[in-house]
Image: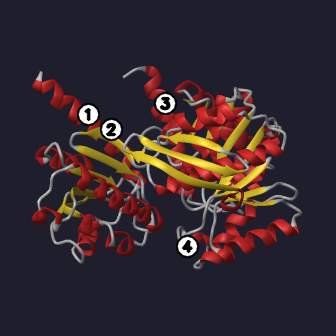
Amino acid sequence: MSTDSTVSRSTLDYLYSLERFGIRLGLETTEKLLSMMGNPERSYKTIHVAGTNGKGSTCAFLASVLRSQGYCVGVYTSPHLVRFNERIQVNGIEITDEQLIELTEFIRNQYANAGLASTFFEFTTGIAFEFFRRQKVDIAVIEVGMGGRLDATNVLLPIVSVITNISFDHQAYLGSTLLEIANEKAGIIKRGVPLVTGETHSEIRNLFERHCKELTSEFQSSHESITVHRISSNLEGQVFRSEGRICGEFFIRLLGDHQLQNAQLALATIAQLRNEGIAISDSAIKEGLAHATWPGRLEIVNNSPLVLVDGAHNVAGINAIVTFLHQLAKQRRELLTLNEQFQKKPPFSVLILAIASDKEHDLMVRDLVPLFKQVIVTEGSFKPIPADKLARAVREYNSNVLIIPKPTIAIREALQFAKKNDVIVITGSLYMIGEAITSVKRMLTLEQKDLM
C-alpha cells in the first residue's frame, strides 16, 4: 500500500470518526468556522438545492449545463456511492486524495483554534466551500444534506434556491406531516432570492408561496413555467420537448418519468438563472442535458442479463422505480415472444433489496416485490434493517425469498443463475448501491476473462 493511500485512509478514518457526534441541526458552528476562514462561500455564486427526492439528479443537470456554457462549476452532494471524493467535484472531477488530506488538516486546525467540535457533515461542508474557493469556481451547485432550515449548507446566500419536491423522509428530524417537512425545506428561501420548485401539492406550494411573499422573493413553479412532453424513450435515454420559458427538443440519458420532472425543474431553474444575468445559451442547455449523468439512479450496469441499479431509498423513490418497471415490462413484452402462461407470471427475474432501518419498509416492498420471481434480501453498510426482518415483510407479498445479508454474495447468487434475457434489479438503500455497482462490474469482468 502506498503512503498516499495510507494517509488517505487515516484522513477518512478521522472524518468518519466525527459521525460519533451524530446529526446536529443548526448553523452556529458552520457560521463560526466559515467566518474564521474569511467566508469562502461568498467568493463564488451558488445554487442551493433542497427537497426529498431528485436533488442529486437536478444538481447533475444544472452543473452539466453550466459546464457546457464554459463556467467552472463546483458540485457538493451526499452521500457518496463508492468514494468519499465523489461528494466534492469541480467540472466533473472529484477532489483528489491529496487535496482532501490537505483541506482536512486545514479545517481541523481551524476547529481546534476555535475550540469547536464538529459533526461529520459540518466538517465536510467546510472542506467543500474552501475547496471551491481555491479552485476559483464561478458557480457552485450545493445540495442540502437534510431538511433545509437548520442544515449546515444553509449559511449560503444563493442566486437561486431550488426545492425539488416534498415527501416523507427523516421524520424524526423534520416532522411527522408533509407540511412540517415542507416548512423545514422552505427554510432555504432567502430574502430577495428567487425560489424554483417542482412541488405539485397545492398546500405545500401555497406554503412556499407564503414564505416567498414574506421575504419578497420571486416564486416559480417549474410545472407552470415549463411543460415537457416525452417524444421517445428506450434504455439509452429519453427525448422530450419543452415549451414555455425554454422551448426545444432535448435528450437525457437518465431514465424514468421522474427524471423528466427533474429535467423540467432544471430547465425552469436555468430560465431563472438567465433572468438573474447568468448567460446560458440554447446550445449549452441541449449539450449539458445530453451529457448529464448521475450514477446509481436507474443505472444499467450490464445488458445481458439486464442489471439495473437504483438508489430508491424511500417510499417516493420506490414508487418511481415501480412506475419505470411497469413501463419496461410493457416494452419487453413487445420485444420478446412470450406465451400466455409466461405473461401471467412476474415479469422480472430477481430483486436484490436492502432498506435502511429508518425507512417505511412495509410500504416500500408492497408494490415492488410482486414484480419479481425471486427476491434476495440483503443489508447495506449503514443502519440496515436486518435481512431476516426485511424478509418477513417481503413474504407478505412474495413467497420466493432468499436471505443473504452480504450484498456481494447476494449479487453473485443472482448472476450465477441469470439467463441472458433475465432482468436483475438492485435497489432500496443508497448504502448498498455503490458496492453493488462495483461488484457487478468486477464479477462480469472476471467471468468474461474466464471465457477467453
Specify the label residue 438 is tagged with.
2
Marks 3 and 4, how far apart in space?
34 Å
What residue appears at the point 87 percent right and 69 percent down from the top-left corner?
A: 214
Which label number is shown at residue 442? 1
Looking at the picture, tell me which residue is in the foreground, 310 or 82: 310
Q: How many marks?
A: 4
Q: Is residue 181 visible?
A: yes
Image depth: mark 3 or mark 2 in front: 2
Which numbered disc flags the more N-terminal residue, 3 or 4?
Answer: 3
Q: Is residue 39 left or right of residue 392?
A: right
Q: Residue 268: x and y, percent? A: 69, 51
Q: Amino acid at mark 2?
A: Thr
Type of amino acid under label 1? Arg
**Residues at marks 2 and 4, CA–CA distance in whole angstroms:** 32 Å
Closer to the observer: label 1 or label 3?
1
- The residue that mark 4 highlights is 172
Q: Circle 3 is placed at which residue position?
A: 8
